[in-house]
Image: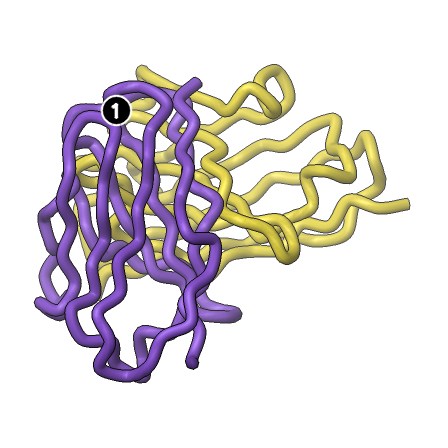
Chain colours: A yellow, B purple
Amino acid sequence: EVQLVESGGGLVQPGGSLRLSCAASGFTFSSYWMSWVRQAPGKGLEWVANIKQDGSEKYYVDSVKGRFTISRDNAKNSLYLQMNSLRAEDTAVYHCTLYLNRGMDVWGQGTTVTVSS
Amino acid sequence: DIQMTQSPSSVSASVGDRVTITCRASQGISSWLAWYQQKPGKAPKLLIYAASSLPSGVPSRFSGSGSGTDFTLTISSLQPEDFATYYCQQANSFPLTFGGGTKVEIK
């Protein structure tokens, strides 16, 4: 069974940092693009970042450029999102997804990030 | 950035109804459009990719059409489990962008 399990969310003060992790199983992780997508409370979906199979290409939404870094460890079947200089508007549920055929084919259940003093 | 506009923002329908949701891109995106279904408290689920392709396991009552800037998601006969929020997403270029969502409610 294909599965994505996120972890690392929590409560952090504005300006703080968090590192999200996503453990992948049930598929050949190193063969696929991966994505992070977030959803603020009561709001719609917002794409955050994508990373190519070997990590050689990375793309970000403008609002997180320079603050967030997407990375992966194919040996550990894991995806990461390092989040620095966090703001209240980064408060959301963060989902990791398998990006296939230009669609987010499989989603994790999400991890909640709350930025508040 | 490509803006995605969905309409309507909400629709009330009954079981058995045909429901159509539209999505318009601010510029041409060929057929690089996906549709997702999200139920409360759950992660979204991919319904359609490449405008009209159904992933394995998605019921055939769901269909997608369109190319360029105008796209449609159709549910041919609404079932109780279809009451949810639906999102379109363009996959033509980065940054990837989603529509604002359409909530399908029980009439």
For residue B16, which quarter of the picture? bottom left
Residue in the foreground of this view, choosing between A35 and A25: A35
**Total count of labels:** 1
Mark 1 is surrounded, within 10 Å at the Cα level, by few (under 14), some (14 to 19) or many (20 or more) other residues, namely: some
Q: Position of residue B47 (x, y in %)?
A: 23, 57
Mark 1: which secondary structure?
loop
Q: What residue type is labelled 1?
A: Asn
Residue at left 38%, top 50%?
B87
Q: Residue furthest right?
A: A117
Residue A117 drawn above or below residue A34 = below
Residue at left 37%, top 34%?
A73
Left or right placement of residue A34 versus residue B61 in this view: right
Residue at left 53%, top 25%?
A69
Left or right placement of residue B85 versus residue B34 in this view: right
For residue B19, which quarter of the picture? bottom left
Residue at left 31%, top 33%?
B90
Q: Where is residue B11 in the image (x, y as percent from the top left)?
A: 42, 65
The N terminus of chain B - image quarter: top left
Residue in the foreground of this view, choosing between A112 and B39: B39
For residue B66, which quarter of the picture? top left
**Residue B40 seen in the figure:** yes
Left or right placement of residue B7 versus residue A82 in this view: left
Residue B100 drawn above or below residue A52 = below
The C terminus of chain B - image quarter: bottom left
Left or right placement of residue A116 versus residue A67 in this view: right
Q: Where is residue B36 in the image (x, y as percent from the top left)?
A: 32, 54
Q: Where is residue A45 in the image (x, y as percent from the top left)?
A: 49, 46
Residue A3 drawn above or below residue B90 = below
Residue in the foreground of this view, choosing between A98 and A72: A98
Query: What chain letter is assigned to the residue under label 1?
Result: B
Read off the residue under disc 1: B92
